[in-house]
């Protein structure tokens, strides 16, 4: 396996880069996961403190920042095309790609690299928060896993949990600004604290004691790191201000494939976690992830993944076609043809949609409490039930409004609702 070309940038050099944005007009594009969007939110506050203003297009800007993602090959290619289109601008690149694919970027443009670690360090001196809708609070960076296919793990490095005091202070700042939904996120939220002698249930219990009116959505959790804290984690979810929602990527329904992936758990472990949560919270929403076409995945392995979806009945399945990533142990392994991965993706998606329809049918016509978390546009809002059902209502309601709604129409990933007056 080739050594990953991680770049390093001294703090002084990094802070000098940030100084170049002083009093500049800045345009930012962000790609990828909620963590990346959390980085951008911090960067915006840092640049505001330096007098920067933000514009809606590259053409209006003095400086352009692209926050990149490289989770799969298709995304990488999209990033490189976009960077090539912007090569004539005063371009800065941050996110995962500069950490592991510097040469690929330099082949299409010559930007200034802005390490995400500098963003985190600089934010500690600012600590402002923006917006009054859905907020993102990062609780750690990196992970403790050894997944054989993951480039993000290499880009973000080993687990580094952020101190409780910082997390609590940021949550309080967002709550004071009026954010009704606060998403705590990480590459693996459930491994928070393992490097500092603490655990996620303890963090959640500490959040429970914070003043303010807000709801917490707990981000993606790896089954491998959930197993050691399962009972305490389920207890911590009893807090009223935590959405009864879990994002628990299983990735495969075959133990042989999970072992090849280096995931560190079995299908039985995953099902035990789900069953334990559902026993305590029968209406909990479950989101999971699946990879199809993983090297060596037989028809039987794939069938086991489809069978698992039918057994566990998740409310959402994020399906990804396996993509070879550089600098990973599987980067040189034989890959399936695209048509095989597309075929399996289509079959799995069809199965998942039948599950969604069956689950959602049981919600239609029910009256549920809700909290407005976002304004979609004038006269339309997104609201969330206590178990994180998405409810779109054609109403002029302020963010933070609480009420009751009748679920009228199933839109697969959300409902159309009518306000109960």
Image (cartoon, helix red, strand yellow):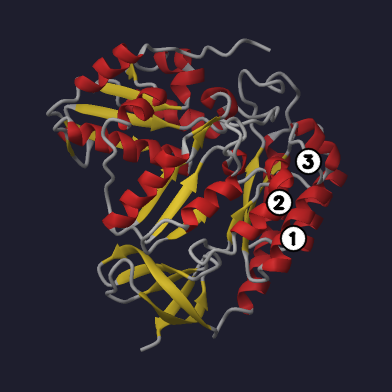
Which quarter of the figure is the N terminus placed in? top right
In terms of image quadrants, where is residue 62? top left
Tell me if 417 is positioned left or right of 112 in this view.
right
Q: Which mark is residue 265?
A: 3
Position above or below: 109 against 24? above
Spatial distance from mark 1 to mark 3, Cα to Cα? 16 Å
Q: Which mark is residue 230?
A: 2
Q: Secondary structure at mark 2?
A: helix
Mark closest to the chain's N terminus, 2 or 3: 2
In the image, 167 versus 188, the foreground residue is 167
In the image, 47 versus 345, the foreground residue is 47
Q: Which residue is mark 1?
A: 276
Cβ atoms under marks 2 and 1 closer than 8 Å? yes
In terms of image quadrants, where is residue 259? top right
Tell me if 350 is positioned left or right of 401 in this view.
right
Mark 2 surroundings: few (<14), some (14-19) or many (≥20) residues within 10 A: some
Q: Position of residue 342 (x, y in %)?
A: 67, 44
């Amino acid at each position: 396996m080739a050594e990953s070309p991680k770049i390093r940038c001294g703090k002084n050099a990094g802070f000098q880069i940030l100084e170049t944005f002083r009093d500049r007009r800045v345009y930012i594009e962000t790609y990828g996961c909620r963590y990346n969007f959390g980085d951008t939110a911090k960067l915006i506050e840092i640049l505001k403190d330096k007098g920067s203003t933000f514009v809606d297009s590259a053409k209006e800007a003095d400086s352009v920042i692209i926050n990149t993602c490289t989770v799969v090959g298709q995304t990488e290619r999209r990033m490189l095309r976009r960077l090539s289109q912007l090569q004539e601008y005063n371009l800065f690149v941050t996110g995962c790609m500069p950490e592991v694919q510097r040469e690929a970027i330099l082949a299409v443009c010559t930007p200034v690299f802005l390490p995400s670690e500098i963003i985190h360090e600089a934010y500690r001196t600012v600590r402002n928060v923006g917006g009054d809708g859905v907020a993102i609070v990062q609780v750690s960076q990196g992970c403790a896993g050894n997944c054989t296919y993951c480039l993000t793990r290499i880009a973000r490095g080993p687990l580094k949990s952020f101190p409780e005091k910082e997390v609590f202070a940021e949550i309080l700042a967002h709550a004071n600004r009026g954010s009704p939904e606060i998403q705590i996120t990480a590459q693996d939220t459930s491994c928070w604290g393992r490097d500092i002698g603490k655990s996620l249930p303890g963090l959640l219990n500490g959040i429970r004691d914070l003043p303010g009116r807000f709801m917490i959505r707990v981000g993606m959790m790896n089954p491998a790191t959930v197993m050691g804290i399962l009972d305490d984690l389920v207890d911590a979810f009893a807090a009223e201000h935590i959405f009864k929602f879990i994002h628990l990527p299983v990735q495969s329904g075959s133990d042989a494939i999970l072992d090849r992936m280096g995931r560190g758990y079995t299908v039985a472990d995953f099902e035990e976690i789900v069953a334990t949560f559902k026993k305590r919270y029968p209406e909990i929403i479950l989101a999971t992830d699946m990879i199809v076409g993983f090297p060596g995945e037989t028809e039987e392995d794939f069938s086991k993944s489809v069978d698992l979806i039918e057994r566990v009945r998740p409310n959402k399945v994020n399906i990804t076609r396996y993509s070879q990533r550089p600098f990973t142990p599987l980067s040189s392994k034989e890959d399936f043809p695209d048509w095989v991965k597309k075929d399996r993706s289509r079959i799995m998606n069809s199965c998942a949609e039948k599950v969604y329809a069956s689950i959602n049918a049981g919600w239609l016509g029910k009256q549920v409490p809700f909290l407005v978390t976002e304004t979609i546009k004038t006269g339309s809002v997104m609201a969330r039930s206590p178990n994180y059902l998405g409810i779109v209502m054609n109403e002029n309601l302020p963010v933070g409004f609480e009420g009751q709604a009748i679920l009228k129409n199933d839109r697969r990933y959300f409902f159309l609702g009518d306000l109960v007056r």
